[in-house]
Image: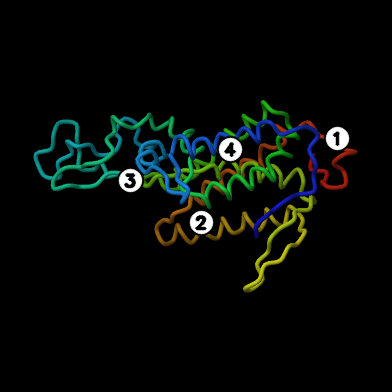
């Protein structure tokens, strides 16, 4: 299901939601040097995306060029230092991205939050952020929404790292932070109506569905895919980040959302407070 529009108007222009969308596209074009075909600078991904192993082994990091794969090993280098994404083994040495050329692993939690792997990745994320982010921003005000969004992204990243702490594969995308927005929206506006593209066999149709159904279906898909990928040893999508972000949104939205008008929202929301 692909959501296109909801029926909840906002009381003021969603400045932060638009700013976040602009920031993501700016990173995509100006920082990742995305092309019309959607290709991005892979060196940027390898350096600034989040690699779980780097976060769980602070001070140790991935292998470097001195990591010879036969004794004797140079001082301070152990065979357990893995080859991360962006590195390859050339004979007895590791070549490619070197630890001293990478930012601090903690910083990559934030840089990866604004990076994407291609057109489908960024367009899908920004569509969800535009449809659901404006109302969540409206419910809490701009400063709180910035904090809510960033904390959601951090929790999402840590959830993925907790499940795959030794992964040496890059993780990037705004979907974890946006999942927090979806979780908050699901609790604030479960009865909102969302115009959605729904595939039926080989055809597509437009249906107006309750937000709780659309977002609940999305969450169930993430849980199923997370179960599948964990059983087969991994996958290309950080499903546990999606789950972690969504749960964060559900659990914390009451702490952030306070700007609501019962007369304005009553027809479209349940009394969740």
| Residue at the disc numbered 3 | 85
Quarter holding residue 11? top right
Question: In 3D space, how far apart are the residues under numbered discs 1 and 4 (Cα atoms)?
Answer: 25 Å
Q: Is residue 2 left or right of residue 23?
A: right
N-terminal of the two: label 1 or label 2?
2
| Circles 3 and 4 in contact, beta carbons < 8 Å | no
Question: In 3D space, how far apart are the residues under numbered discs 4 and 2 (Cα atoms)?
Answer: 18 Å
Q: Residue 226 has which mark?
A: 2
Q: Is residue 157 left or right of residue 270?
A: left
Identified at 19% across, 35% down, the residue is: 77
N-terminal of the two: label 1 or label 4?
4
Q: How many labels does the image show?
A: 4
Identified at 46% across, 51% down, the residue is: 37
Circle 3 packing at 10 Å, graded few (<14), some (14-19), many (20+), is some
Circle 4 sits in a helix, a strand or a loop, which is it?
helix
| Residue at the disc numbered 4 | 152
Mark nearest the camera among 3 and 2 is 3
| Residue at the disc numbered 1 | 261
| Extreme residue toward the bottom, this view | 201
| Circles 3 and 1 in contact, beta carbons < 8 Å | no
In the depicted view, which residue is nearer to us: 30 or 172?
30
Circle 3 sits in a helix, a strand or a loop, which is it?
loop
Q: Residue 20 has which mark?
A: none
List x then y, in percent, for residue 108.
Answer: 43, 34
Circle 2 sits in a helix, a strand or a loop, which is it?
helix
| Circles 1 and 4 in contact, beta carbons < 8 Å | no
Identified at 76% across, 49% down, the residue is: 6
Q: Is residue 53 visible?
A: no
| Figure colour scheme | rainbow
N-terminal of the two: label 4 or label 2?
4
Circle 4 packing at 10 Å, graded few (<14), some (14-19), many (20+), is many
List x then y, in percent, for residue 31.
Answer: 44, 35
């Amino acid at each position: 299901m692909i959501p296109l529009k909801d029926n909840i108007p906002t009381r003021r222009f969603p400045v932060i939601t638009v700013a976040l969308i602009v920031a993501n596209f700016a990173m995509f074009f100006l920082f990742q040097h995305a092309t019309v075909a959607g290709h991005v600078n892979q060196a940027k991904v390898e350096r600034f995306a989040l690699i779980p192993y780097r976060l769980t082994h602070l001070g140790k990091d991935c292998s470097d060029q001195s990591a010879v794969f036969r004794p004797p090993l140079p001082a301070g280098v152990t065979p357990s230092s893995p080859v991360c994404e962006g590195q390859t083994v050339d004979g007895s040495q590791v070549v490619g991205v070197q630890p001293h050329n990478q930012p601090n692993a903690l910083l990559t939690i934030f840089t990866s939050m604004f990076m994407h792997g291609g057109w489908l990745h960024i367009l899908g994320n920004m569509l969800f952020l535009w449809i659901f982010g404006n109302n969540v921003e409206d419910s809490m005000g701009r400063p709180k929404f910035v904090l809510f969004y960033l904390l959601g992204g951090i929790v999402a990243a840590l959830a993925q790292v907790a499940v795959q702490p030794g992964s040496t594969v890059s993780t990037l995308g705004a979907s974890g932070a946006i999942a927090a927005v979806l979780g908050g929206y699901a609790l604030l506006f479960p009865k909102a109506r969302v115009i959605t593209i729904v595939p039926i066999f080989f055809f597509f149709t437009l249906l107006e569905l309750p937000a709780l159904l659309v977002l609940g279906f999305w969450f169930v898909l993430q849980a199923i895919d997370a179960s599948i990928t964990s059983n087969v040893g991994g996958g290309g999508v950080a499903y546990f980040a999606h789950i972690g972000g969504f749960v964060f949104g559900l659990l914390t939205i009451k702490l952030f959302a306070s700007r609501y008008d019962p007369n304005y929202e009553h027809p479209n929301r349940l009394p969740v407070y």
